[in-house]
Image (tube, rainbow, N blue to C red):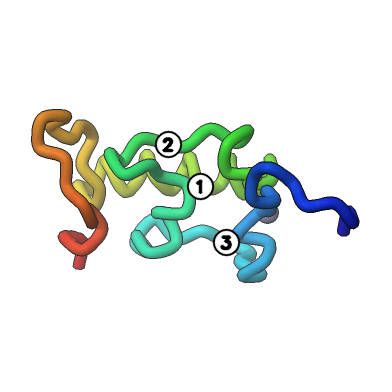
Amino acid sequence: MAPERRKYARKYCKYCEAKIEFIDYKDTKILKHALSERYKIMPRRLTGTCKRHQEMAELAIKRARHTALIPYVVDTRNVVAHPFDQLQ
Ligand SMILES: [Zn+2]
């Protein structure tokens, strides 16, 4: 750990931290680490997710969208405070 405090929260891979080996597309709670509040896939440079897990998350998110677990597009005028409460 760097001794000085950083301006931004330290980026780390949440999937590595949780020791997740496989990202299941049915597990929306796991997928939300890689999704924005409007269900868009978060870029790795913002989340700090490692390449391996980012690719897994992208694939899982695309499958989840295909199976209608996650919406493709969210109405931008209808911003929800806690969008993931609607899941499950
Ligand atoms: Zn990782």
- For residue 18, what is the image quadrant? bottom right
Name which residue lies at 63% across and 33% down.
45
Badge number at residue 57: 1
Q: Which residue is mark 2?
A: 41
- The amino acid type, in three-letter code, at marker 3 is Phe
Using the image, tell me which numbered label, if any, was put on residue 88: none
Residue closer to the observer: 84 or 20: 84
Is 2 left, or right, of 64 in this rendering? right
Mark nearer the viewer, 3 or 1: 1
Give the residue at x 68% y 61%. 16
Tell whether label 1 touches label 3 (CB within 8 Å).
Answer: no
Horizontal side, residue 32 vs residue 46: left or right? left
Could you tell me how far apart the alpha carbons at marks 1 and 2 are, in whole angstroms? Answer: 9 Å
In the rendered structure, are the residues bearing label 3 and label 2 in contact, judged by CB atoms less than 8 Å apart?
Answer: no
Q: Could you tell me which secondary element the residue under label 3 belongs to?
A: loop
**Residue under label 3:** 22
Q: Earlier in the sequence, mark 3 or mark 1?
A: 3
Foreground of the two, 12 or 23: 12
Which amino acid, by three-letter code, is at mark 2?
Answer: Ile
Q: Mark 1: which secondary structure?
A: helix
